[in-house]
């Protein structure tokens, strides 16, 4: 089995103080995709290049304390690609692709952090620019290779993907245009929402993010924002998935999928 986890850390140093390393030691994934590292290389040096015995690879934001993604793996990638070729968003550290190619297979694990538009109209417009630019990136990738894209997509796709869907229809993360983009990815590009392929009807159990306001976490007033999006042949190898909520390392929960193959 290839055990693949994704987690928005909301700051790697913060998550470390909350016990994420000890959990990873016991959880023992083959690979973990992380988002919102919120650090620069000097912050990672001598401390976070390795995590629970896994080697880290990173794409960090130019702005300090902001964004940044990474992939920690027990297996040495054949290649690492930092950035998706869109300068505005590559400067924000949002895309890292680790390739595990063999003579018989072309396969990538991608960690991606989609922009949030919740801070205001300017960032929502940036989010739309990202979605427009990223669609052809995914289209090209799925024509060339098998892959799993893991990350914080910042979109709840369906009504069952958030607690208060009625009151959030005009809020970033559940806007019609965002949801339609994700539908296009699934329908036109034929990528698979792996969690939903295994659990098509779950609601509260599916949430991966909770606001820090009020008692959202205690009352499970959450959103499903974190995904595994896979090419069809890879998605068919998904055997089980779990969202870990026994401990809280971040405002997001880690989501893990076991795939029936070895890297």
Image: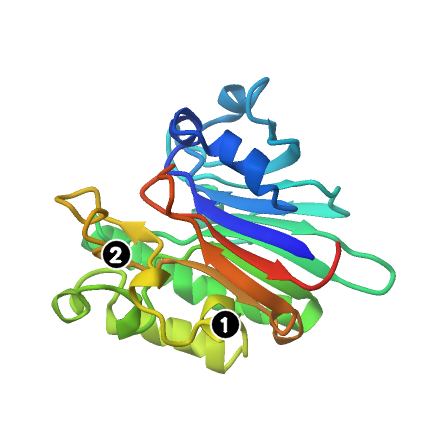
**Residue 121 seen in the current view:** yes
Farthest-out residue, right: 103
- Residue linked to disc 1: 198
Q: CA distance from mark 1 to mark 2?
A: 20 Å
Q: Is residue 64 above or below residue 59?
A: above
Eyeballing the image, is 227 above or below 77? below
Quadrant the N terminus occupies: bottom right
Q: Residues within 10 Å of mark 1 (few under 14, many from 20)?
A: some
The image quadrant that residue 215 belongs to is top left
Q: Mark 1 falls on what kind of element?
A: helix
Is 147 rendered above or below residue 152? below
Who comes first in sequence, dot 1 or dot 2? 1
Which residue is tagged 2? Answer: 222
Disc 1 versus disc 2: nearer the observer: 1
Q: How many marks?
A: 2
- Residue 186 percent across, percent down from the top left: 48, 76
Task: Report the residue that reaches farthest toward the bottom.
Answer: 187
Foreground residue among 248 and 143 = 248
Looking at the image, residue 182 sits to the left or right of residue 75; the answer is: left
Residue 173: image location, x then y, percent = 27, 61
Query: Which residue sits at x=59%, y=61%?
Result: 148
The residue shown at (25%, 66%) is 174
- Residue in the foreground of this view, choosing between 158 and 83: 158
């Amino acid at each position: 089995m290839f055990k693949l986890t994704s987690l928005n850390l909301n700051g790697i140093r913060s998550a470390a103080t909350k016990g994420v390393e000890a959990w990873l030691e016991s959880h023992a994934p083959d690979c973990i995709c992380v988002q919102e590292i919120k650090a620069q290389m000097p912050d990672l040096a001598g401390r976070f290049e390795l995590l629970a015995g896994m080697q880290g690879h990173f794409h960090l934001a130019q702005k300090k304390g902001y964004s940044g993604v990474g992939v920690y793996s027990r297996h040495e990638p054949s290649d690492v690609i930092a950035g998706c070729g869109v300068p505005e968003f590559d400067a924000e550290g949002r895309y890292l692709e680790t390739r595990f190619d063999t003579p018989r297979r072309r396969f990538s694990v991608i960690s991606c952090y989609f922009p949030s538009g919740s801070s205001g109209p300017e960032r929502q417009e940036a989010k739309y620019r990202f979605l427009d630019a990223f669609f052809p990136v995914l289209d090209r990738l799925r024509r060339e290779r098998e892959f799993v894209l893991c990350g914080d997509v910042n979109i709840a796709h369906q009504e069952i993907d958030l607690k208060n869907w009625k009151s959030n229809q005009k809020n970033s993360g559940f806007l019609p245009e965002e949801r339609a983009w994700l539908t296009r990815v699934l329908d036109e590009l034929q990528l698979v929402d792996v969690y939903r392929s295994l659990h098509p009807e779950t609601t509260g159990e599916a949430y991966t993010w909770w606001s820090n306001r009020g008692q959202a976490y205690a009352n499970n007033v959450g959103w499903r924002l974190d995904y595994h999006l896979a090419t069809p042949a890879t998605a068919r190898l998904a055997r089980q998935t779990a969202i870990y909520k026994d401990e809280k390392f971040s405002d997001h929960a880690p989501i893990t999928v076991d795939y029936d193959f070895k890297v």
